[in-house]
Amino acid sequence: MAKAGMDVTEVTTPCLLLDIDKVKENANSMIERCRKLGVKLRPHMKTHKCLEIGEFSTGGTKACIAVATLTEAEFFARGGFDDILCTALFTADKINRMKTLSEKLKLFHVMVDSSYAISLLKTPPSTDTRWSVYLKVDCGNNRGGVRWDDTAEALSLAKAMLDSSCSISFQGLYCHDGNSYACRGASEIKTVGGTSAERLLLLADKLRSGGVCVPTVGLGSTPTSSHPTESMQKLTELHPGNYIFYDVAQSVIGSCNIDAIAVKVATRVIGHYPHRNQLLVDAGFAAMSHDGRGVLPNHSTCVVQDHPELSLVNMNQEVGFIEAVNGTMNYTDLPLGSLLFLLPYHVSHVSCKPCIM
Amino acid sequence: MAKAGMDVTEVTTPCLLLDIDKVKENANSMIERCRKLGVKLRPHMKTHKCLEIGEFSTGGTKACIAVATLTEAEFFARGGFDDILCTALFTADKINRMKTLSEKLKLFHVMVDSSYAISLLKTPPSTDTRWSVYLKVDCGNNRGGVRWDDTAEALSLAKAMLDSSCSISFQGLYCHDGNSYACRGASEIKTVGGTSAERLLLLADKLRSGGVCVPTVGLGSTPTSSHPTESMQKLTELHPGNYIFYDVAQSVIGSCNIDAIAVKVATRVIGHYPHRNQLLVDAGFAAMSHDGRGVLPNHSTCVVQDHPELSLVNMNQEVGFIEAVNGTMNYTDLPLGSLLFLLPYHVSHVSCKPCIM
């Protein structure tokens, strides 16, 4: 990792650049938004996988976070974090690692949406602990989770957890409303966020009517957490992740202004090819990821900062192909060796080495 | 990394599985093919980035390899490899690392296609060494390189290297004929390989006629190296990389039979969703890569081993979405927790942790 404060022209490319002031601003805005909403923030770590940024996003408490994998959970546990929710659905091969985390942490939560998963938790992690378990709910995202309107199934699973002979402590409901990624603009985002929250709260009420205590009702995605609705005040927690950096996709969705994007990839021009009106840069899909390939209006996979006339039209593993959107490439202004800064479409899979500026 | 010889049902998923016998068979077949052809093999390490596999692919010599980045060059140099060609076009920020490699190794080669890059090499790496430099040539691939038919430019660059006051030792020509990836079947592959070799050899002859010594004429891609033509006998080296594992893309191109694929991703079923005829597995694009998303005839991004009725239709970061190609999913045969093995479309960007079986 390059050092904070070094001259950006000195970085070896490709290099992920973080604007640490923007990271802190994004972190603090979400903390403040949740405070006003009266809902606990459980920031997701999957986007950055970084202890320092985890500390910013928890306001320094290093507690109450979500992670996507057990490997991430183990990493943050070693880094001194606690109250960790692992959002992955698990299988039998994961139980021993889950036990170790349950013993090590004050609070470690896992997620289920099937009786199979509950059956794997019939033995408590240790003699004096219980599994802390969320029920994953699908409020329209069509990924994992029990459907929000399948009360019978949700009630059956919740009751199976209550009847678990004290091996399980049922924590409540979790929903990732990732269908918000199809929205364009704050109004559509609020419709998805509001609808998801209402569906989740309705299911929570039905479980309560069925005799189940539901302490937590948590929802999360960056778009809906960036534009919360009034009905979301009745939730108990939010768990967005991408907002810490934001990216071009989030600006297209309407979660943020493009100025809020805290991350970019520095790359250098390595070749001029006027016979096909292209130049090559040293960032390919190994650095930038394929996610969102060609989806922007100019068929670009990213925004080339300060160069609206340029489009990243293709990538190989280590090389990006840049074209002029209209007319002929101005090679004079982009000599070999010159730096360009690419704002990534989807930041969660950008994987070149970071440099905090 | 999981241990060689462990029971495959014990792996924690997602997990990259290598069939080490197939890896060795692919390595030895290419060594034998090049021996018969009378052409030196310079295997590319970018696909596996692994010292042990580098050793197999060099027949144990740990010499004469190609790498895609300086980071890979440094890794293999630390691992005891020598005669390393870095195929990336470079900029000024890379010179110090290139100097260190030139001093450390007996043979370290770099690649240029512009007078800008040559100008960066006007000082030798040290008082008693010279830069060993290949000229990158484009024989129809439309990526980096001087065009094969631009004799004037190639001659001008080669002469600039000869006139470099002894800072540069010109090694010859290099071409990656990656346009072979558009081929379907051995006949089309041989046309691309033959044409590329003839173009490259023609340019070499023209340089020689212009007074330039061209020791090396090297060509490489997995498809054309898997089906070499007679004209390729006149080349001096081949540098394929992907062949060490092969993948579904290579079987579609016609480079290999699907049985030659030495790598697969083990994943487990984590959710049943009969209302949308889907199941979820714990391998998403973080494990499998987006490359080749949905390109197979059944709109799958991979081959699900032993399950021609299944298609990987979508991926999130950590989750894969599998559908039945025709009719209804047979969930009884695919219970939660059961293992599936995915043959990746493009293996070079598969990034989950490996397990050698």
Image: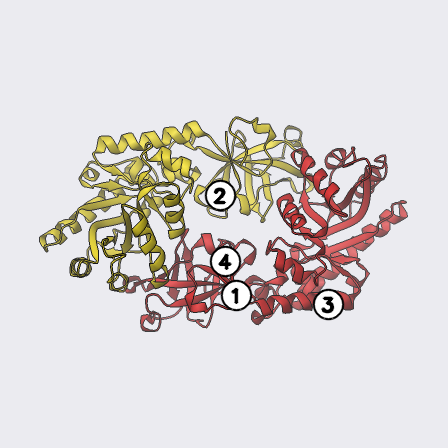
Chain colours: A red, B yellow
| Neighbour tally class for label 1: few under 14, some 14-19, many 20 plus, Cα within 10 Å | some
Q: What's under tag 2, amino acid-wise? A: Val
Label 3 to label 4: alpha-carbon separation: 32 Å
Foreground: disc 3 or disc 4: 4
Check whether the beta carbons of the residues at disc 3 and disc 4 lie within 8 A of each other.
no
Label 3 to label 2: alpha-carbon separation: 38 Å
Q: Residue B247's x, y, as percent?
A: 43, 37
- Host chain of mark 2: B
Q: Is residue B343 visible?
A: yes
Q: Which residue is mark 4?
A: A1
| Neighbour tally class for label 4: few under 14, some 14-19, many 20 plus, Cα within 10 Å | few
Label 4 to label 1: alpha-carbon separation: 9 Å
Q: Is residue A260 left or right of residue B171?
A: right
What SS does tag 3 mark? helix
Q: Evaluate whether label 3 is on the same chain as label 1.
A: yes
Is residue A357 or residue B266 the one in the foreground?
Answer: A357
Asked which quadrant contains residue A338, the reply is: bottom left
Q: Evaluate whether label 3 is on the same chain as label 2.
A: no
**Residue at 10% of width from left, 54% of height from top?**
B211
What SS does tag 1 mark? loop
What SS does tag 4 mark? loop
Asked which quadrant contains residue A249, the reply is: bottom right
Q: Which residue is mark 3?
A: A33
Q: Which residue is mark 2?
A: B350
Q: Which residue is mark 1?
A: A4
